[in-house]
Image (cartoon, helix red, strand yellow):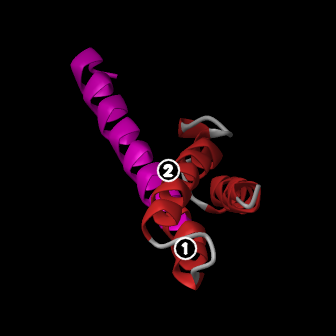
C-alpha cells in the first residue's frame, strides 16, 4: 500500500517536469510522468526487497531517483528529437 505514496509523488514530479523543462512541443504531456512513475515502481519494489519497507533509504531512493531519471530521460528524448528533426530538414533541404 505504501507504494502508492511513491507513485503519487513520482506522478506529481513528472508532471512538474513536463511544465518546467524546455521542449514541451517535442514530447507528449504524459511522457515525463510515465517515466517517473514506472521508474518509481521498479525502484520501490527492488528497494523493499533489498532494504526493507521500514528503511529510510527505501523512501529516499524511491522519491529522488525517479525525479532524476525522469528529467534525464526527458532531456535526452527532446535532444534526440531535435537531432532527428534537424537531420530530416537537412535531408529534405528545407
Q: Is residue 21 above or below residue 59?
A: above
Who is closer to the viewer here, 67 or 47? 47
What secondary structure characterizes most of the magenta part?
helix
What residue lies at 44% left-to-right and 45% top-to-bottom?
Answer: 78
The picture quadrant where one finds residue 82 is top left
Q: Position of residue 92 (x, y in %)?
A: 28, 16
- Residue 53's place in the image compared with 87, above or below, is below
The tag on residue 42 is: 2
Image point 47% across, 60% down: which residue? 49
Label at residue 58 = 1
User: In the picture shown, does residue 32 fall above or below 87?
Assistant: below
Q: Residues within 10 Å of mark 1 (few under 14, many from 20)?
A: many
- Where residue 66 sits in the image (x, y, percent)? 53, 61
Tag 2 secondary structure: helix
- 35, 62: nearer the viewer: 62
**Magenta stretch bounds:** 67-94
Amino acid at each position: 500500500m505504501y507504494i502508492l505514496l511513491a507513485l503519487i509523488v513520482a506522478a506529481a514530479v513528472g508532471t512538474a517536469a513536463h511544465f518546467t523543462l524546455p521542449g514541451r512541443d517535442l514530447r507528449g504531456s504524459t511522457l515525463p510522468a510515465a517515466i517517473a512513475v514506472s521508474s518509481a515502481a521498479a525502484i520501490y519494489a527492488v528497494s523493499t526487497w533489498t532494504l526493507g519497507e521500514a528503511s529510510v533509504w527505501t523512501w529516499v531512493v524511491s522519491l529522488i531517483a525517479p525525479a532524476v531519471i525522469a528529467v534525464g530521460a526527458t532531456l535526452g528524448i527532446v535532444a534526440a528529437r531535435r537531432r532527428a528533426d534537424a537531420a530530416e530538414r537537412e535531408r529534405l533541404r528545407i
